[in-house]
Amino acid sequence: MKFKYLFGPVPSRRLGLSLGVDLVPYKVCSYDCIYCEVGPTTLKTVERKAYVPLEEVKRELETFWSLGVETDFITFSGFGEPTLHIGIGELISWIRERFPLPVAVLTNGSLLRDHQVRKELMGAHVVLPSLDAGTQEVYRVINRPHPSISFQDMVDGLEI
C-alpha cells in the first residue's frame, strides 16, 4: 500500500524499525544544509503552519496500523523540518492515545528556542536534534539557516 505522508518502516540503528511521518512538503525547511541527502531546500522558512492536513495523516496512520506491520517507533522526520507543522503536538498526543508505540522526532533543532515548539514536543518519547557546528561562522556555512536564526538561538534551544 502506498501512503502520501508515511514511509517505511525503515531500519534505524537508533530506533529499530521506524515508521516515518512527513508533515511538510518536499524540502520545506528552516535550513538548507550542504549535506542534505534530499537536495536543496525549496522553501527556507520559519513559518509554522498546517503544511499538510492532520486528518489525512491520522487516516493513514490508522490504515497502516490495521496492516499489522512490525514497527518499533513512529518517527517524525521526512523531507523537511517537522517542527514547522503547527499541529505536531496535537498529532503526537493523538498517536500516544491510540498506538502502543513510542514517538520520536528527528529535528534540526532550529525551532527549539520557541517555547510553544518545546511544549508540543514534550509528548514525544525521544527528540533527536542535530548540532553540526560549534561557531556562528561554521553554522552559517554548513546549515545555511533562515536569516532569522542564529547559532546562539540554536544552542539556547538545546538547553533543558
Image: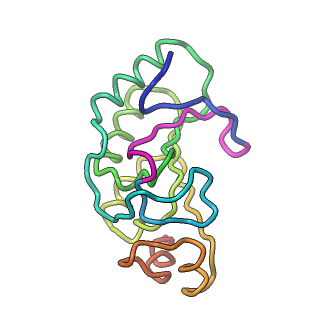
Q: Is 151 one of the magenta-colored residues?
A: no
Q: Position of residue 52 (x, y in %)?
A: 31, 40
- For residue 75, side relative to residue 54 (left or right): right
Is 56 in front, or is 71? 56
Q: Which residue is located at x 63 percent, y 71 percent?
A: 132
Q: x%, y% of residue 109?
A: 49, 64
- Residue 73 image point, x, y percent: 57, 35
Q: Residue at x 41, y 47 (%)?
A: 123
Task: Judge from the rendering whether residue 135 lies leftward or rightward of residue 54; answer left or right.
Answer: right
105 in relation to 60, above or below: below
> Which residue does the image show at 45% across and 68% down from the upper left?
110
Q: Which residue lies at the image location 40% right of the left edge and 20% below the top edge? A: 62
Viewer-proximal residue among 104 and 40: 40
Compared to residue 51, the image places residue 136 above or below, namely below
Q: Position of residue 120 (x, y in %)?
A: 35, 53
Q: Is residue 48 left or right of residue 143?
A: left
Task: Compare residues 26 and 85 and report the one nearer the observer.
Answer: 26
User: Quick check: 145 above or below 41?
Assistant: below
Q: How many badges with numbers are in the image?
A: 0
Q: Tell me the colour scheme of the image.
A: rainbow
Range covered by the magenta-colored residues: 13-27
Residue furthest right as drawn:
13
Query: Looking at this view, is 5 or 116 the one in front?
Result: 5
